[in-house]
Amino acid sequence: MMGLTHEHELHRRRFGRNLGVALVLGAFIVLIFALTIAKVSGGGVIEAFDHTYRPALDPAVNPALRGEE
């Protein structure tokens, strides 16, 4: 009868692969988070296309967009 604490060699290899996948996934998550923080903290106004009129983007209203200042 085998004891429950006996670990097969297959389990050690599988653990190694699982650990590698977990590290790669963690690195990917950290990379995406860092890119998101860098984009958000860029400083400029963050405006998305939301199907509404924004006077700040209209050259007829905003002289800076016409090249006048």
Image: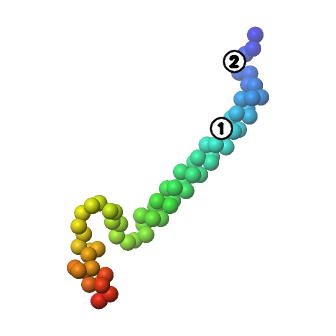
- Which of label 1 and label 2 is nearer to you? 1
Find the residue positioned furthest to the bottom. 69
Relative horizontal placement of residue 8, taking residue 52 as reference (left or right): right
Q: Quadrant of the C terminus?
A: bottom left
Q: Mark 2 is on which residue type? A: Leu
Q: Position of residue 9 (x, y in %)?
A: 77, 28
Residue at 30% across / 84% down in the picture? Answer: 66
- Pick whichever, 12 or 5, lies toward us: 12
Residue 6: mark: none
Its colouring scheme is: rainbow
Q: Which residue is mark 1?
A: 18
Figure check: 6 above or below 68? above
Q: Extreme right residue here? A: 9
* Side of 67 relative to 31 (left or right): left
Residue 4, numbered label:
2
Q: Residues within 10 Å of mark 2 (few under 14, many from 20)?
A: few
Mark closest to the chain's N terminus, 1 or 2: 2
State the separation of the CA atoms marked 1 and 2.
21 Å
Task: Indicate the secondary structure of the residue bearing disc 1.
Answer: helix
Q: Is residue 38 left or right of residue 6?
A: left
Give the quarter of the figure containing the N terminus.
top right
* x 27%, y 61%: residue: 51
